[in-house]
Image: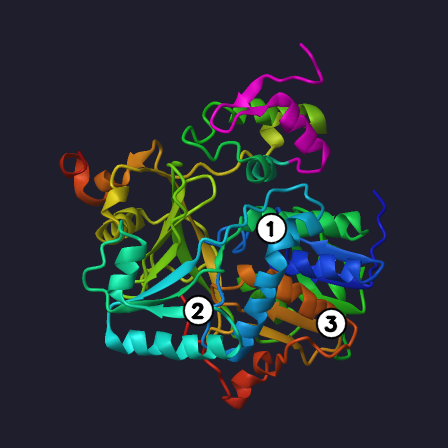
Amino acid sequence: MSETHDKTIVCRCEEITVEDIRSCIAKGFDSFDEIKRVLRVSMGPCQGRGCKDIILREISAAKKMPIADLDPGTVRPPVKPIKIGVLAYGEEAGK
Amino acid sequence: MSEKRTADAIIVGGGVHGAAAAYYLAKAGVKDVVLFERKYLSSGGSGRSAAGLRQHFGTEVNCRLAKYNLECFPTLEEDLGGELNLEFTQWGYLWVAYADSVLNQLQKNVNVQQSLDIPSVMMTGDEIKKKWPYFNTNEIVGGAFCHMDGHINPQTLTMAYGYAAQKLGARVFHYRPVEKLLAEGGKIKGVVVDGEEWHAPRVLLTAGPWSTPLAKTVGLDLPVEPERHNLLVTEPVEVFECPMVLCLDDGAYFKQLPNGSFFLGRDDQDEPRTTEVGNSAKFLEGVTKSVLKRFPGLAGVRVIHQWSGPYDVTPDHQAIIDWTPIEGLWVNCGWSGHGLQFGPSGGRLAKEMFFGEKTFVDIHNFRLSRFAEGDLFPEPAFI
């Protein structure tokens, strides 16, 4: 596994690579909440389902801290994206 | 770990005002500036803000400061080092009235703005319909619009100020909550963090609604209270530069962000008065119903997530920017929901006050003693 110059996409919603995550951590934005706000990871439609574990692993490696000791950020409702029309008037009316 | 626990100035709170103050002080040559933030920069009210930028205010001092903010924003990303994308846009800000009395107040506000060369204009319902055909303008009696106003990313704005301050030598500590302030013989002495004393001759309190309990630790009463507000964001759709639209019947508002997403928000008087940032389930139904009435075309756009954050509200919905009766302790808080955009002027004022300079705008109205004197100066244009 390449340690540097890794172009593997971590966040598919925002097309953020492993390299982007590592360089963000190196700049001092080294908590999940900060990386999220700097790179928009986990702010897209997947809400971090695809990327969060990988990012936490990168932070853990960089800070030499167990993942269990890292703040994983907040999971916010709704769990899955819902159309505005459905939220306002229900499933039938939202069609 | 041994760290130098003294400073020329200690800033309590890493919201936009604390981070901007750190930047302006460090830039002005103050050698040892220390900022303590309880979580990460922007984690309080700042980063949770809808981050509208506007010059629509009804009091002259706010208009003057807002004008300065809008002078700073176009080059701010570059000025702060260009590391973070501030997502600054100027797609305009529209205040919509549904009653004549509200329209009259907008007219008064616009008169103040125009007297200070802010390019706000009044619009009729027909003019609004013509400019933005996708709005439902039924029941609208008119509005006020400023094309220079817009949006900025509140989180990267705050972090960029902190990052730039650090590059200039300031020490910015994350996840280090200040437990209490320290004063002795009527003078500020420093703060307590992690059970240890940090000493400085000057301490700036910029902790939003958390300022109130912190000020109490040195016997100072601040009439600043938390008030929770909710917001949601949608998936990105095609960018058509929808301005910030604020509906002055039930306080609903919406705007498009540079990536195409929409922010939707709405007032709710029943929300708890707390800094606790939980989510209100009923918010989703209320805000989507209200916004769909004004903009039916959004029905098919998906909501991605909701969140909440606290305003720091004062009795007249105006900030408190002043030296306190405790020598060396000054405060900048109580912005009552419109504070994020005042980061540039708040930071500049903190610097000018630190050096005892004449402030670039007369801020006498923001003094702390106005509450005891009963000399409030209510801001009519608050959300």
- B221 left or right of B169 in image: left
- Give the percent coordinates (x, y) of residue B220: 62, 75
Query: What's the residue at 49%, 67% (across, down)?
Result: B55
Disc 1 chain ID: B
Query: What's the residue at 60%, 61% (across, down)?
Result: B343
Q: Is residue B18 visible?
A: yes
Q: Do the residues marked 2 and 3 share a common chain? A: yes
Residue A7 vs B280, above or below: the answer is above
Q: Which mark is residue B352?
A: 3
| Crowding near the residue tagged with mark 2, few <14, some 14–19, many ≥20 C-alpha atoms within 10 Å | many
- A41 left or right of B25 in image: left
Residue B281 vs B326, above or below: the answer is above
Residue B247 vs A78, above or below: the answer is below
Q: Which residue is mark 1?
A: B157
Query: Which part of the image, by quadrant, shows the N terminus of chain B?
Result: top right
Of discs 2 and 1, which sits in the foreground? Answer: 2
Q: Is A10 one of the magenta-colored residues?
A: yes
Secondary structure at numbered mark 2: strand
Q: Which residue is mark 2?
A: B120
Secondary structure at numbered mark 3: helix
| Magenta span | A1-30
